[in-house]
Image (spheres, rainbow, N blue to C red):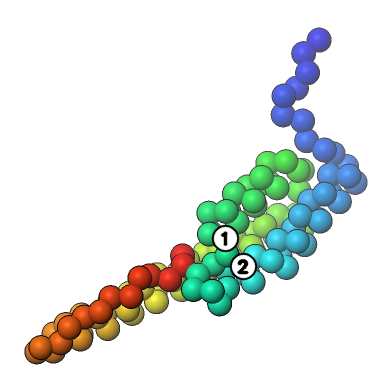
Amino acid sequence: MDHPTDTKPQGAFSALLADQDLVHLELVLRRSLECDFGGPLLPPSYWRERLAIITRASHLSHTQIQTVHRLYLQIDEFEAACREREEERERADAAVAEQPGAAVVRKPPRGG
């Protein structure tokens, strides 16, 4: 007898597991990305993979799918803000470099 290799929990149990995972991610994702230690505690790629795992492992309800989309948008916003900060640093460095006799000290990019 062949057993399916990709079984997903179904029904109320599946919904409960997905709800627990999504509530946890809602609580920790933004805090992790906006860490004050010079960058995110965990990179955006980690959070994207966590969301993908939840999506693949469960039959999500419409509300759960909306939550997943909202969390992906938070990650996108974080990455866009990181790009904007990096571009601002590059513009500031270029402006300083244009001044005669100025030495540019480049700081390493912050997380993102």
Instruction: Residue 72: give x, y in percent of width and height.
Output: 59, 60
Tag 2: Cα neighbours inside 10 Å, few (<14), some, or many (≥20)? some
Q: Which residue is nearer to you in this view: 103 or 1?
A: 103
Residue at the image position 57 percent from the left and 68 percent from the top: 33
Residue under label 1: 42
Q: Which residue is nearer to you in this view: 40 or 78?
A: 40
Q: CA distance from mark 1 to mark 2?
A: 6 Å
Q: Could you say which disc has been placed on residue 32 in the image?
A: 2
Q: Is residue 31 above or below residue 8?
A: below
The first of marks 1 and 2 along the sequence is 2
> Please, what is the three-letter code of the amino acid marked with disc 2?
Ser
Give the SS element for disc 1: loop
- Left/right placement of residue 2 relative to residue 16 reads left
Give the SS element for disc 2: helix
- Left/right placement of residue 93 relative to residue 112 reads left
Residue at the image position 84 percent from the left and 39 percent from the top: 10
Quick one: which residue is furthest to the bottom in this view? 100
Q: Is residue 112 above or below residue 97?
A: above
Instruction: Residue 94: give x, y in percent of width and height.
Output: 20, 80
Residue at the image position 49 percent from the left and 73 percent from the top: 38
Asked whether disc 1 touches disc 2, contact meaning CB atoms under 8 Å apart, the reply is yes
Quick one: which residue is furthest to the right in this view? 12
Tell me, yes or no, if residue 81 can be seen here.
yes
Instruction: Residue 31: give x, y in percent of width and height.
Output: 64, 71
> Please, what is the three-letter code of the amino acid marked with disc 1?
Leu
